[in-house]
Image (cartoon, rainbow, N blue to C red):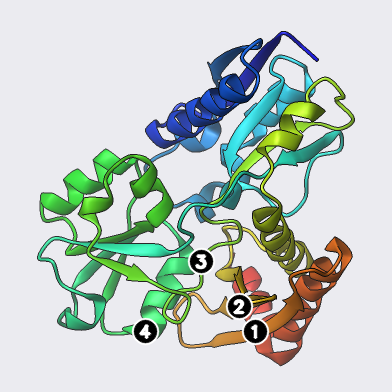
Amino acid sequence: MKKNIRIGTRGSQLALWQAHHVKSRIETLFPELKVEVITISTKGDRITDRPLALVGGKGLFVKEIETALLNEEIDLAVHSMKDMPGEMPEGLVIGAIPERENPFDVMISRENKLLADYPAKAKIGTSSLRRGSQLKAARPDLEILSIRGNLDTRLKKLKAGDYDAIVLAAAGLRRLGQEHEITQYLDEDLMVPAVGQGALCIQTRENDRDISPVMERLDHAPTRFCVTGERAFLKQIEGSCHIPVACYAQIKGNQVILTALVASEDGREVIKRQSTCPEAAPVSTIVDTGRALATQLLENGGKQILESLNSND
């Protein structure tokens, strides 16, 4: 095993928290190792004035870090799993998925109102087409506006009155100790989370035997099983930030329940289905379940929605 480990990460407040959290876990489990965090600027961090879907989608937050990993400038990379495209670059793998944080989206309200309580034309800010389309489906009378920037920037814009409420991932707020800002949790009945939301992706080089013992200790098997099903769905449906798709797997009893969605950007068309898989099943079964769920959505109107979205690009 290596004596020194270099962790690559974005430079945002949340990304640094996540990288240092992984650093701390490694140092606790392997006190003989020296762990360093290296900050890498990504295109997604540098472009903050336009919606992600207009400038390339979620891959913008990982490409430069993946290049550094392939070039052996770092030994592992820590990403938010929801930022990861369905396809992994050749030579790289998901080395570990630690235990998941709360996977749901949340609303932060300037007047402490719930989503159902807002009047027509209230301004709701989000950076996500997935969130925007589901908000429009639930409340077509609201005005959904784009918002970018780090957490502090978004909260300042909200408190300045630019928005009546904003929608974010619960995990980031909880990790940064700002759970008190949350007005309402939006569960999967109201808003299906993004694939991998709340989970971390620790990315490594394929067959890097030096790092494998560390990854084995960091991996959380139930989280990996669920996220593997979600990512199988994503890959099958060829989803990204460009299109409003969602999939969330949760363990209930001895079953894994996958809830998935494809929606039109205006929220007028929403195709939503569920499927189940035994928790004790082999990984191949959850992969097949995720793929089959994607195929089911496509065959029941999802394909037409996606083709319509692509034709409007």
Find disc 2 in the rendering and name its residue. 259
Image point 38% across, 32% down: which residue? 13
Image point 73% across, 68% down: which residue? 233
Q: CA distance from mark 1 to mark 3?
A: 14 Å
* Crowding at mark 1 (Cα within 10 Å: few <14, some 14-19, many 20+): some
Marked residue nearer the N-terminal end (2 or 4): 4
Q: Residue type at mark 3: give it.
A: Pro
Find disc 3 in the rendering and name its residue. 193
Where does the image place residue 218, in percent across and percent down from the top left?
Answer: 66, 37
Q: Is residue 277 left or right of residue 61?
A: right
Q: Is residue 57 visible?
A: no
Q: Residue type at mark 4: give it.
A: Ala
Would you say the residues marked 1 and 2 are in contact, meaning their CB atoms lie under 8 Å apart? yes
Q: Residue type at mark 2: give it.
A: Thr
- Relative to 297, say whether 161 is above or below: above
* Crowding at mark 4 (Cα within 10 Å: few <14, some 14-19, many 20+): some
Marked residue nearer the N-terminal end (1 or 2): 2
Q: Which mark is residue 274?
A: 1
Residue 303 sits in quarter: bottom right
Residue 175 sits in quarter: top left
Image point 49% across, 25% down: which residue? 20
The C terminus lies in quadrant: bottom right
In the foreground, 306 or 80: 80
Q: Is residue 44 left or right of residue 309?
A: left
